[in-house]
Image (tube, grey):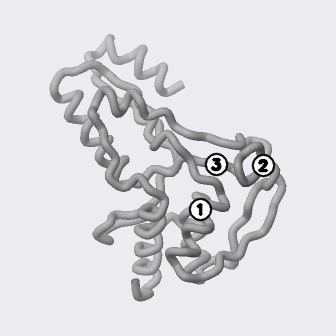
């Protein structure tokens, strides 16, 4: 609804806009300056790194019988730094007087819940306790972005687009946030 309102209102008042549709934002600043500190976070990577540092007892796996390679849900996690870069490029695009834009922000590929938990275990050197839960009614088996328009229009090239990097930066931030050695 908000996207439609922007499209309807913009011509009437000369508004330039860029719509960025986020997929799963994860990771932290690679230099350790900022990261997610949301209380009661629900994003899988954040929850898993909280388990790794002892802030939570475990992580729920919602369904293991999806029609995906390992039966768990698949999501497209985008590193927060790549998303920030997309924002900067959209602003530059609009400042140059170019047309309003709408982009999906992700990498065009996903990782399953089990792949994410395995990556956190490797990075943390510990086991992540998990428990099986039933599917949530609103969850699709897979949700992956198509960033083609973002890449083609803005020549956007992600720099942190592998799961290990996303997890490593999130874990380093979580350790710092909790006063633990990196």
Q: In the figure, 76 relative to 149: above or below? A: below
Give residue 147's position: percent from left, percent from top.
Answer: 43, 34
Label 2 to label 1: alpha-carbon separation = 19 Å
Q: Nearer the viewer, residue 53 or 118?
A: 118
Query: Residue 8 sits in which quadrant?
Result: top left
Q: Nearer the viewer, residue 108 or 172?
A: 108
Q: Which residue does the image show at 53% across and 43% down from the upper left?
A: 109
Q: What residue occupies the far front of the structure in this picture?
A: 69
Q: Horizontally, is 178 left or right of 69 in the view?
A: left
Looking at marks 3 and 1 on the same chain, the residue that comes earlier in the sequence is marked by 3
Q: Which residue does the image show at 29% across and 46% down from the upper left?
A: 85
Looking at marks 2 and 1 on the same chain, the residue that comes earlier in the sequence is marked by 1
Residue for badge 3? 74
Residue for badge 2? 136
Frontmost of labels 2 and 1 is 1
Frontmost of labels 2 and 3 is 3
Give residue 83's position: percent from left, percent from top.
Answer: 37, 47
Q: Horizontally, is 54 left or right of 13 in the view?
A: right
Q: Horizontally, is 162 left or right of 85 in the view?
A: right
Q: Which residue does the image show at 48% across and 66% down from the upper left?
A: 167
Looking at marks 2 and 3 on the same chain, the residue that comes earlier in the sequence is marked by 3
Label 3 to label 1: alpha-carbon separation = 9 Å
For the residue labelled by badge 3, is the local secondary structure a helix, a strand or a loop? strand
* Count of numbered circles in the view: 3
Q: Which mark is residue 116?
A: 1
């Amino acid at each position: 609804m908000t996207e439609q309102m922007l499209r309807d209102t913009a011509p009437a008042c000369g508004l330039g806009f860029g719509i960025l549709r986020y997929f799963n934002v994860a990771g932290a600043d690679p230099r350790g300056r900022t990261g997610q500190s949301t209380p009661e976070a629900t994003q899988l990577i954040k929850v898993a790194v909280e388990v790794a540092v002892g802030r939570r007892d475990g992580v729920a796996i919602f369904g293991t019988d999806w029609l995906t390679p390992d039966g768990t849900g698949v999501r497209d996690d985008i590193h927060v730094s790549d998303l920030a870069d997309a924002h900067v490029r959209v602003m530059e695009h609009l400042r140059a007087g170019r047309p309003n834009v709408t982009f999906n922000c992700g990498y065009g590929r996903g990782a399953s819940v089990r792949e994410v938990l395995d990556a956190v275990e490797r990075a943390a050197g510990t086991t992540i306790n998990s428990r099986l839960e039933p599917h949530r009614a609103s969850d699709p088996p897979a949700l992956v972005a198509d960033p083609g328009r973002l890449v083609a229009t803005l020549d956007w090239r992600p720099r942190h687009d592998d799961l290990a990097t996303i997890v490593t930066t999130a874990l380093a931030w979580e350790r710092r946030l909790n006063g633990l050695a990196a």
